[in-house]
Amino acid sequence: KAVSDEVKQKISYDRKSKSIIYRLSVNASGIKDLEGDVGKFIVEDCFRDNDFKFAPIIEDTANPANNKYFLIYKGSAAHRYEGTDDVNVSNVYEQTVKAEGHYLSDSELAAKGITSEFGVSYYKDYANFKFDKLDGSYVIFLKAKLYETQIGELNEEGTLPNDAYIKI
């Protein structure tokens, strides 16, 4: 059963922690070259305005160095032509990767050549994910939290855009 955009908005924002968890679908169509991968691939995500900052999606209060700011899962295209394994590319707005199994551990990420970088540039928080070889579909989960200065301004239902880019 499909979930409406309105319901997705209501369940993705946690008013108590003033945060959202969202996903980036990577290579939802499962594109590969003759060698079985896409090669080097970069996913960049940044917030358009200075309203949100990245926050740990898994927090270790005893040892903050163990905080996880993202979770990456191998996945498969969520939308396929009925009765086939072929990805349905007719609706470009619904190219979603369905997470499978457990998120990749630090050692699995390193073995696959997947690295991350978080920072602030031009007053915008960003996250970069680099794949040495993009060998399939992935989903990246991130958590964004309102800056304390924005709590009174934006702690309400609405849409705040962010920008995601890919580079080969």
Image (tube, rainbow, N blue to C red):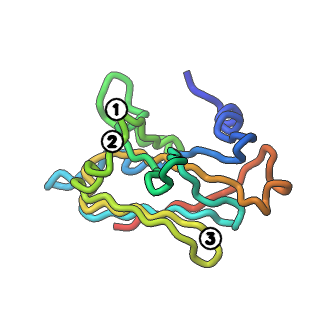
Residue 156 image label: none
- Residue 123 appears at what percent x and percent y? 65, 75
Q: Which residue is drawn at 51% across and 41% down?
A: 94
Q: What residue type is labelled 3?
A: Lys
Comparing 64 with 4, the one in front is 64
Q: In this view, does 32 lie to the left or right of 79?
A: left
- Residue 153 appears at what percent x and percent y? 84, 57
Label located before the other in sequence (1 or 3): 1
| Residue at the spot of label 3 | 124
Q: What residue type is labelled 2?
A: Lys
Q: In this view, does 2 lie to the left or right of 107?
A: right
Which quadrant holds the N terminus? top right
Q: In this view, does 135 lie to the left or right of 156?
A: left
| Residue at the spot of label 1 | 101
Which quadrant holds the C terminus? bottom left
| Residue at the spot of label 2 | 74
Q: Do the residues labelled 2 and 1 touch (CB within 8 Å)?
A: yes
Q: Quadrant of residue 160?
A: bottom right
Q: Residue at x 34, y 32 (%)?
A: 101
- Residue 111 appears at what percent x and percent y? 21, 54
